[in-house]
Image (cartoon, coloured by chain):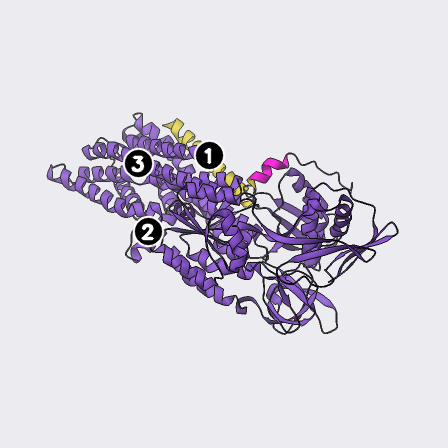
């Protein structure tokens, strides 16, 4: 290898499932001479490549394809420091520092508790202070920052009582140390920070993990198009580098990367992600086409008219921005609890101080007791109770194929009592499936399979999928040749067989392909979108859980009616994105609505719903707007997620009760002055372990 | 007291060593792919030049 400066690129590869995949990718990719090294990140389903600078994107993706993996480029690995990931790194560092400090201070504290006195005790207290002060300054920052932010906006959150407690306790302990007093609470303060940071870190790990999963699913990120240059040659151009006026070549089976008008060619486009319309639309020269639609039939040339934020979808983006504001007003359960909790705690501490002052204990002793009350009531268990339960739940759900984007999504999901569901792509699979294949003559079945396998056309792929499920034998065909826009042709013995577009177009919503032998029509295979296999069962389960379900579709009434009938649901049809948003708003007055949808047209509704879900096959807009994403063809994960969310909420409530119960016992003790640093340390770690243990029970709840 | 003068620095030093080791492993990305690390044990090493 010469000393060429290598460039780094990241790819999302959703299909990494086992050790075999890791080996295959890492060892297979480096066989390509342009790739110097490949490293798989299994957790995030990514591959990191170092390659020579002139390796073009399609070549790299091709290298994955030859190994049998689908890869999507993600961003540019150079210099895009992910703020969220950096955040959880900083938290992890704070956890480590506070953990180290906690153990060392505890070591010193244990000696103090077991009877060190006089100069030794003072020495130990001073040592503790020297360890604790920098730790508090470093590890306490996340809390101080957030508390300051809340106070500046004249609000309170969980972090306000924490920060006040930590600061007052540290100040008093320092005073005690300086005056050779017996009680320094450095161990308590640092332990408090440690437990709370653990909770914070768990919360951010959960968000990171889901975000990693979602990025791996985003299909349109970093896509592009073959652009026709002035010299008549076509070159791959990233979607971000596309400009109005360029001419892009869109092959059959490719998604459009930008808006534009057809310059040459006739084809049919699948608009289902855009509008929910299930029937493909015929486009001719000069027709306007939109980014995100799928070209079904034949290659077309498109003159780009708008890219990126200027596309016709900008309207939808604006609607989504407005719709999402409602959600940002949601207050998380821990902060809601803190609104009541913080004033109560501070009042109690103040009361203790005043009470002991009146009883004539002197201000020093009274302050010590007030600090003991503060330390005991500090919401240590609360800060851990919620994230611990939620991360266990999210982990369990991830194993059944549901990605939860953050903890608040689980909280909101638990509250829904009504579900509005999109049809195309959500209740249905959103892709063509070949119909009535088993009625076909076995000979024809195998011929169709042989021809279909040779093509990447969406209908051929659907046919291949359907026939492979039937276990069809492959006949001996040769000289397979594909003519874009027409079909596949091959020799079978002395015969010429073709699989292709019907000669006279079957009008309307019927997608079809025809198999001919020596020019004579042998079979017509129809395609249609199909319901997801467990749609009925999932809807029944939702109803049994007390959730009203209805359909919200952009498709025509005639296409929705059979689905609604089969699933026994009410339906609203022919809805624009605005209509969906309005329908949701009407329901939101009296209900908490769960929106489930996949298309761009569902985006605003997904953003507005109290909670929202999207299938893994959804449009990028849909996946970004939804709170949860379920993978695979089945709908049952929706039910699992809902039940898990409710179960999590129950556990969180139990944890709150446990924490309050612990306060009921401990606060009077603190009030009476029995809480020494030793008791505080025991109480704090004990209650934290109990809530974490309770949260762990969720691990088994999914089965 | 003399014992303490020796033992406390040792205890703190060992703790700091652990902390430093953790930061080092964090920076080296050893915690980036925990699920993958569990699976890598099954990956057979390919001989150099076998391909």
Position of A542 compared to A458: left or right? left
Q: At which x and y percent is residue A79?
A: 56, 57
Q: Which chain is yellow?
A: B
Which marked residue is nearer to the observer: mark 1 or mark 2?
1
Q: Chain of mark 2?
A: A
Q: What stretch of residues is rendered in magenta?
A: B35-49
Q: Earlier in the sequence, mark 1 or mark 2?
A: 2
Q: Name, please, the residue furthest toward the top.
A: A114
Front position in the image: B1 or A481:
A481
Q: Earlier in the sequence, mark 1 or mark 3?
A: 3
**Majority secondary structure of magenta residues:** loop
Mark 3 burial class by Cα count in 10 Å: few <14, some 14-19, many 20+: some
The reply to the same-chain question for discs 1 and 2 is yes
Mark 2 burial class by Cα count in 10 Å: few <14, some 14-19, many 20+: many
Q: Residue at x 70, y 37 (%)?
A: B45
Which residue is identified by label 1?
A699
- Residue A376 — which label? none
- Residue A147 — which label? 2
Q: Secondary structure at mark 1?
A: helix
Say which colour chain A has. purple
């Amino acid at each position: 290898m010469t000393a060429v400066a290598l460039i780094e690129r990241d790819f999302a590869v959703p299909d990494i499932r086992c050790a075999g995949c890791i080996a295959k990718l890492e060892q297979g990719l480096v066989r390509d001479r342009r790739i110097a090294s490949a490293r798989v990140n299994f957790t995030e389903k990514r591959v990191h490549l170092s390659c020579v600078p002139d390796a073009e994107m399609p070549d790299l993706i091709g290298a994955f394809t030859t190994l049998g993996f689908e890869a999507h480029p993600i961003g540019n690995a150079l210099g895009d420091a992910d703020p969220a990931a950096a955040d959880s790194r900083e938290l992890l560092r704070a956890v480590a520092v506070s953990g180290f400090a906690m153990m060392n201070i505890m070591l010193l504290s244990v000696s103090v508790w077991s009877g060190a006195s006089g100069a030794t005790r003072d020495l130990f207290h001073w040592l503790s202070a020297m360890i604790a002060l920098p730790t508090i300054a470093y590890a306490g920052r996340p809390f101080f920052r957030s508390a300051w932010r809340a106070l500046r906006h004249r609000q309170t959150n969980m972090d306000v009582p924490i920060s006040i407690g930590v600061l007052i306790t540290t100040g008093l302990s320092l005073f005690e140390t300086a005056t050779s007093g017996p009680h320094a609470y450095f161990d308590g303060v640092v332990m408090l920070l440690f437990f709370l940071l653990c909770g914070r870190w768990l919360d951010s790990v959960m968000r990171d993990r889901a975000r990693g999963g979602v990025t791996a699913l985003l299909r349109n990120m970093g896509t592009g198009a073959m652009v026709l240059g002035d010299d008549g040659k076509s070159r791959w151009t990233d979607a971000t580098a596309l400009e109005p006026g360029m001419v892009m070549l869109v092959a059959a089976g490719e998604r459009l990367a930008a808006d534009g008008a057809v310059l040459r060619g006739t084809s049919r486009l699948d608009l289902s992600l855009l509008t929910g319309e299930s029937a493909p639309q015929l486009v001719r020269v000069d027709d306007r086409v939109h980014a995100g639609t799928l070209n079904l039939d034949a290659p077309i040339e498109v003159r780009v008219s708008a890219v990126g934020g200027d596309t016709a979808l900008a309207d939808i983006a604006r609607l989504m921005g407005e719709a999402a504001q409602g959600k940002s007003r949601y207050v998380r359960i821990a902060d809601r609890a803190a609104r009541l909790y913080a004033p109560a705690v501070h009042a109690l501490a103040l009361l203790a101080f005043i009470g002991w002052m009146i009883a004539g204990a002197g201000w020093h002793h009274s302050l010590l007791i007030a600090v003991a009350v503060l330390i005991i009531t500090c919401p240590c268990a609360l800060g851990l109770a919620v994230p611990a339960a939620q991360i266990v739940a999210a982990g369990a759900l991830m194993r059944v194929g549901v990605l939860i984007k953050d903890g608040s999504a689980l909280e909101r999901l638990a509250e829904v009592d009504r579900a509005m569901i999109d049809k195309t792509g959500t209740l249905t699979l959103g892709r063509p499936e070949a119909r009535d294949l088993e009625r076909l003559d076995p000979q024809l079945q195998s011929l169709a399979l042989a021809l279909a396998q040779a093509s990447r056309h969406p209908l051929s792929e659907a046919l291949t999928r359907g026939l492979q499920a039937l276990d069809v034998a492959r006949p001996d065909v040769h000289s397979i040749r594909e003519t874009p826009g027409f079909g596949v042709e091959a020799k079978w013995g002395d015969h010429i067989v073709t699989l292709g577009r019907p000669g006279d177009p079957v009008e309307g919503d019927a997608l079809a392909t025809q198999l001919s032998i020596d020019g004579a029509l042998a079979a017509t295979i129809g395609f249609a979108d199909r319901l997801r296999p467990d749609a009925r069962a999932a809807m029944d389960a939702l109803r049994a859980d007390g959730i009203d379900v209805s359909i919200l579709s952009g498709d025509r009434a005639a296409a929705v009616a059979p689905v609604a009938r089969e699933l026994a649901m009410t339906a609203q049809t022919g809805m624009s994105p605005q209509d969906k948003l309005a329908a949701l708003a009407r329901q939101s007055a009296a209900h908490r609505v769960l929106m489930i949808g996949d298309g761009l047209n569902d985006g605003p509704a997904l953003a507005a719903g109290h909670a929202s879900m999207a299938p893994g096959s959804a449009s990028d807009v849909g996946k970004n707007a939804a709170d949860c994403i379920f993978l695979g063809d089945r709908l049952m994960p929706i039910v699992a997620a809902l039940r898990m969310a409710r179960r999590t909420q129950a556990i969180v409530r139990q944890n709150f009760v446990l924490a309050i119960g612990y306060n009921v016992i401990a606060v009077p003790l603190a009030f009476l002055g029995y809480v020494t640093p030793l008791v505080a340390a025991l109480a704090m770690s004990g209650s934290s372990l109990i809530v974490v243990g309770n949260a762990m029970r969720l691990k088994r709840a999914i089965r | 007291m003399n014992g303490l003068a020796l033992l406390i620095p040792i205890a703190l030093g060992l703790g700091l060593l652990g902390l430093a080791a953790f930061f080092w492993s964090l920076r080296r990305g050893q915690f980036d792919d925990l699920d993958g690390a569990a699976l890598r044990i099954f990956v057979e090493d390919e001989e150099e030049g076998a391909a």
